[in-house]
Image (cartoon, grey):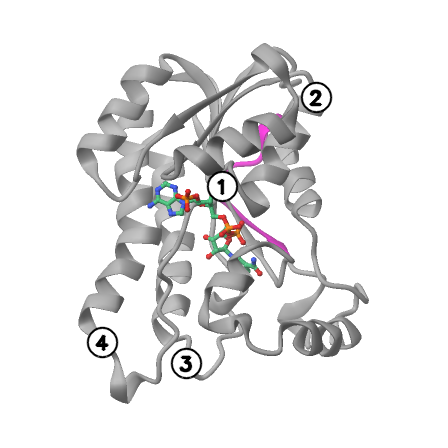
Amino acid sequence: MDISGNTIIVVGGSSGMGFGVAQAALAKGAKVVIVGRSPERLAQATEDLAGGERVKSISADVTREDEVRHLFEVAGSFDHLFVSAASHLAYQPIRDFDLEAARKTIDAKLIAALLLSKYASRQINGHGSITFTAGIAAERPMATAALVAAVNGGLFSFTYALAIGLAPVRVNTISPGWIDTPIWETSALAANKSARFEQMAQRLPAGRIGRPSDIGHAAIFLMENEFTTATVLPVDGGHRLV
Ligand SMILES: NC(=O)c1ccc[n+]([C@@H]2O[C@H](COP(=O)([O-])OP(=O)(O)OC[C@H]3O[C@@H](n4cnc5c(N)ncnc54)[C@H](OP(=O)(O)O)[C@@H]3O)[C@@H](O)[C@H]2O)c1
């Protein structure tokens, strides 16, 4: 399958991996609808993508059912959904865990995936696909990442079940390793970012930290490959093994 001319909804398309996926889809001749909460970030990303009429944006908080319903009403029919949106991920020692922070993390990665699947399934084209974004914490968690590991691992299982439930629509998940995106500036992981990136790059078989374009490339593969469904695709430079 060739996604040229297809409509791709990219939830999280105003930053990081989602922006990389939007860029890759435009380069393939697709139309993109980028989604995020901040209208300002969406406007900036639309300008940066420079795709003219092929780029639209819709502001929505995808942890809220009314906003997800409205998003798909405005978007109309489409071919592929890519989801990388997440914020408020709680990295905390389990002894001190804050319940409110935990609920926000579950909302951001699992409830959002559930809501997006519910409303997307009503109008996605039958040849289309849905791709979620999990993360290396599912398989190589840090000491403070118990909940982030759980929601990412939960997305693996959600993907397998949804691929059965929504067939023939294909459902996959990308599980990224460390990718240099703005999420690193806003999370508890920001401290010593450069030094940590350098150390990780030396450990990784790939010899470098990931880029949003690495995720864009993988996402296009999952949209175009008609025989790939119920798959969790690590794009992590070999992080799982080191
Ligand atoms: N970067 C890494 O090293 C890494 C590693 C493993 C896994 N991951 C996972 O990869 C995913 C993408 O991360 P990223 O690094 O690309 O992050 P990012 O650069 O911070 O981008 C996040 C995007 O999601 C949007 N967003 C956040 N919450 C939203 C909500 N409730 N509703 C709608 N849009 C929302 C943001 O826009 P607004 O803020 O305007 O809403 C932004 O466009 C996340 O799921 C993260 O857990 C990242």
Q: Disc number at residue 28? A: 2
What residue is disc 1 on? 172
Q: Name the residue beneath numbered marker 4.
A: 98
Q: Amino acid at mark 1?
A: Asn
At 32% from the left and 52% from the top, the residue drawn is 108
Query: What whole-number distance in Å separates the C-alpha atoms at marks 1 and 3?
Result: 27 Å
Q: Which residue is mark 3?
A: 144
Neighbour tally class for label 2: few under 14, some 14-19, many 20 plus, Cα within 10 Å: some
Badge 1: residue crowd in 10 Å (few <14, some 14–19, many ≥20) = many
Q: Earlier in the sequence, mark 1 or mark 2?
A: 2
Foreground of the two, 169 or 199: 199
Residue numbers of the magenta segment = 223-235
Q: Classify mark 3: residues with Cα within 10 Å, few (<14), some (14-19) or many (20+).
A: some
Q: CA distance from mark 3 to mark 2?
A: 39 Å
Q: Looking at the image, is mark 3 or mark 4 nearer the viewer?
A: 4
* Circle 3 SS class: loop
Q: What residue is rendered at 70% in x and 21% in y?
A: 28
Q: How far apart in space, not on screen, are marks 3 and 4 (Cα)? A: 12 Å
Check contact, mark 1 vs mark 3: CB within 8 A. no
Rendered residue at 23%/26% (across/down) = 69
Say if mark 3 contacts mark 2, CB within 8 Å. no
From the viewer's perspective, tell me whether residue 58 is left or right of residue 73.
right
Which residue does the image show at 54% across and 43% down from the upper left?
Answer: 15
Compare marks 1 and 3 and give the one earlier in the sequence: 3
The reply, left or right, for residue 171 in relation to residue 206 is: left
**Mark sitting on residue 56:** none
